[in-house]
Image (cartoon, rainbow, N blue to C red):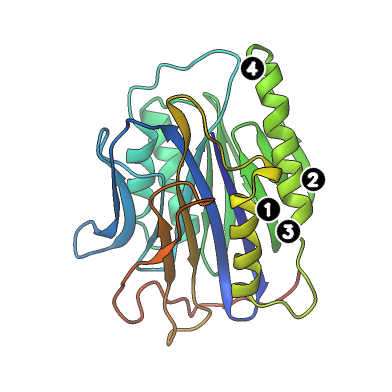
Amino acid sequence: MCTLTLAWRAFDDAPVALAANRDEATDRPAEPPALRGDDDRFVAPRDAEAGGTWIGVSASGVVVAVTNRWLDADRRGDRSRGLLVRDCLQTDSATETVEAVERAVAGRSYDGFNLVIADGDDAFLLSYDGELTVTPLDPGVHVVGNVGGVVNGVERFSVPDRRREVGEERVESARSVASALPLEPGESSEEWLDRASATLADHAYGACLHGDGFGTRSFTRIRTAADADGSVAFAYADGPPCETPAEPVSLPAGFGAVGSRGADRSA
């Protein structure tokens, strides 16, 4: 289980503002965010078991994040979804990233996923259950989890029968998170991210989980810049956000700056 919140092209100063919880087995090893790839092309944490990642941002300003997608029957994917995310972070635009995913799923099989891809020009939700569905995102706030979410202002949930009870709990969590995070008049990207971060840490919204051997393992927030003089702000909590402060990740000046179109506030 994971919960992603995205404000895309909602602020003058930041085309992409994303806050996300990662839920995983407590004994699955992970490494903190660092510059990775050839020529330090992206920054991301690393799944030390499979070698991929679940979230990150590229030097060209493309933000990519993945959740599981619960299905009625498990798929036997022959490649890790985290490796797919790693591949995505080595592209130069959101549109190019979508094309890379389309090629990847045509040639290999993966477990079900929801993949959010966004830069200063375009944003997409890619949902995969053996077939890939690509949904362009409108400017505004979107919430995505394991059973779907609230996307383009519309509820898009699909709960598998075999996980009906817990699936309905995830639906209610996504709804409550979305209801807490509409844009407020005059709000900056940092202020919205502060609210999103607090919401994902608040157990009342059901997004920060604590279970027996499984729960919320980390939290990430990413904000990209709207012009070529800015840079990415990346913070990471190596633990559940209800008890672990998010620490800033040091990045080179100008890393991930976006200057192609900016963040025309239209939401």
Query: Between tags 4 and 2, which lies in front?
Result: 4
Depicted 92 relative to depicted 106: above or below? below
**Any mark on residue 163, and which?**
4
- Spatial CA distance of label 3 from label 1 is 9 Å
Horizontal side, residue 237 vs residue 260: left or right: left
Q: Pick whichever, 37 or 30, lies toward us.
A: 30
Label 1 or label 4, whichever comes before in sequence order: 1
Label 2 or label 3, whichever comes before in sequence order: 2
Amino acid type, callout 1: His
Q: Pick whichever, 257 or 204, lies toward us.
A: 204
Q: Residue at x 51, y 28 (%)?
A: 211
Query: Between tags 3 and 1, which lies in front?
Result: 3
Depicted 130 relative to depicted 191: above or below? above
Label 4 or label 3, whichever comes before in sequence order: 4
User: How many neighbours does mark 1 have within 10 angstroms: few (below 14), some (14-19), or many (20 or more)?
Assistant: many
- Residue 69 lies, in percent from the top left, at 56, 30
Residue for badge 2: 154
How many numbered callouts?
A: 4
Q: Residue at x 62, y 76 (%)?
A: 263
User: Residue 30's quadrant in the figure?
Assistant: top left
**Any mark on residue 142, and which?**
1
Amino acid type, callout 3: Leu
Q: Secondary structure at mark 4?
A: helix
Q: Secondary structure at mark 1?
A: strand
Q: Is residue 39 visible?
A: yes
- Spatial CA distance of label 2 from label 1 is 9 Å
Q: Residue furthest bottom?
A: 229
Amino acid type, callout 4: Arg
Q: Residue at x 55, y 12 (%)?
A: 73
Q: Pick whichever, 169 or 49, lies toward us.
A: 169
**Any mark on residue 181, and which?**
3
Depicted 24 relative to depicted 140: above or below? above
